[in-house]
Structure formats: C-alpha cells, structure tokens
Image (spheres, rainbow, N blue to C red):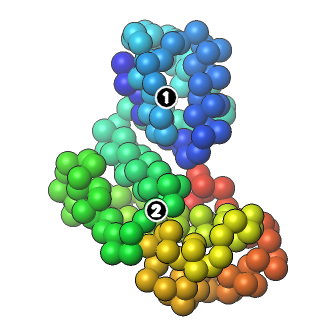
Amino acid sequence: MKLVIKNMVCPRCISAVEQILKENKLPSRYIRLGEVELIKDPGKKRLEKLSADLVSNGFELLDDQKMQLIEKVKTLLIEKVQQGNIEEHFSVSKYLGTQIFRDYSSVSKLFSEVEGITIEQFFILQKLEKVKEWIIYNELTLSRIAGSLGYSSTQHLSNQFKKLTGMTPTRFRQIGAAHRKALDAIH
C-alpha cells in the first residue's frame, strides 16, 4: 500500500517517518521523500492512528490525488536542488514532464491555485535556500554555488539573491543563519 506524506523535505523527515511507522508496527518496503510503501494494508483504524501520529510530528497523510500530485512536484524539485547538480539551461517543465507524465500546463495551473506561487517560483525559492545553506556552512565559493545550481554566472545568482532577500550573498554570510527558512516553510 502506497502512502503520500506531505512535508517530508529532508533525510531527517525520512528518519522521523520511519520511527513513526516503527512505533505503529507498520513495516514498509521503502520510505522516500513524500512517500512510503507499506508491506500490507493496515486497515482503517491503524491508518487513522498513523495519520494522527504523522500530524503530531508536522506531517500529513494525503489521500486527495490533486494534493498528491502537488506534493510529488515539490518532492521532485526539492530532491533536484538537494543533489546540487543543476545544469545551466535546466528546464523545470521538461524535467517534471519526464518525471510525472502529465501535461505541464495543467499541473502548473493546479500548483499555482493551491500553493499561491508558480512551480518556477517554488524552484527558485528552493535554490535560494540551498544557496543560503552553502553560504552559512562556507562549503563552496559563490562561483561554485552558481555553477552547481544552474545559474549562468555569479552575477546572476547575486542579483536573484538580492532581489529575493534584500541583501547580497556577502552580507548574508556576515549575518548568518537568522534568515534561513525551514524547507517545509517555503511556499
């Protein structure tokens, strides 16, 4: 039985959901960002208990197909950003088209209606949070960050960063983590 879970955005989320499943004695075939496959159907009562436990930990079991699709789009984009190997001419629409096998314009319209932002805006916000993470941990130069996240230049990255945060990446580095958002708070 496949379950779609909202707000799974990082490896810690996978661990948290794994623990919740263990506490509910529900063995799984796999646990990935946004989805779990249980070995067998737990029944209505156990599924309700699982749902309540997920909610109390900041997750949500999704049974609506439209919401599942939106969560799938978010998960795919979050995973792409977290991999940190986005090519310069990366196309969100082409990428999602190969992953979800749906008409991009209808998916985009649904996403915008439900989330209040476009898929592209969501993707840019995800990239921006990855930039902040790398800046805070001083893991890469700004040039390497730009290349890893598909920006055509350091200047392009800096301009977008300033437009969306109100400060330059250098200023952000000086201020630090106070301006980072949790991944599940981005939309």
Return the x and y of residue 69 as percentages of the image width and height: 33, 45
Q: Quadrant of the N terminus?
A: top left
Q: Nearer the viewer, residue 113 or 163?
A: 163
- Determine crowd level at label 1: few under 14, some 14-19, many 20+ residues with C-alpha closer than 10 A: some
Task: Give the secondary structure at mark 2.
Answer: loop
Q: Amino acid at mark 1?
A: Ile
Q: CA distance from mark 1 to mark 2?
A: 23 Å
Residue ID at (47%, 34%): 32
Residue designated by label 2: 85
Q: Which residue is mark 1?
A: 31
Between 92 and 2, the residue placed more toward the observer is 92
Q: Give the left or right position of residue 164, taking residue 72 as reference.
A: right
For marks 1 and 2 on the same chain, the one whose residue lies earlier in the sequence: 1
Residue 78 visible in the displayed image: no
Judge from the rendering whether residue 123 lies leftward or rightward of residue 93; answer left or right: right
Quarter of the figure with residue 52:
top right
Type of residue at label 2? Asn
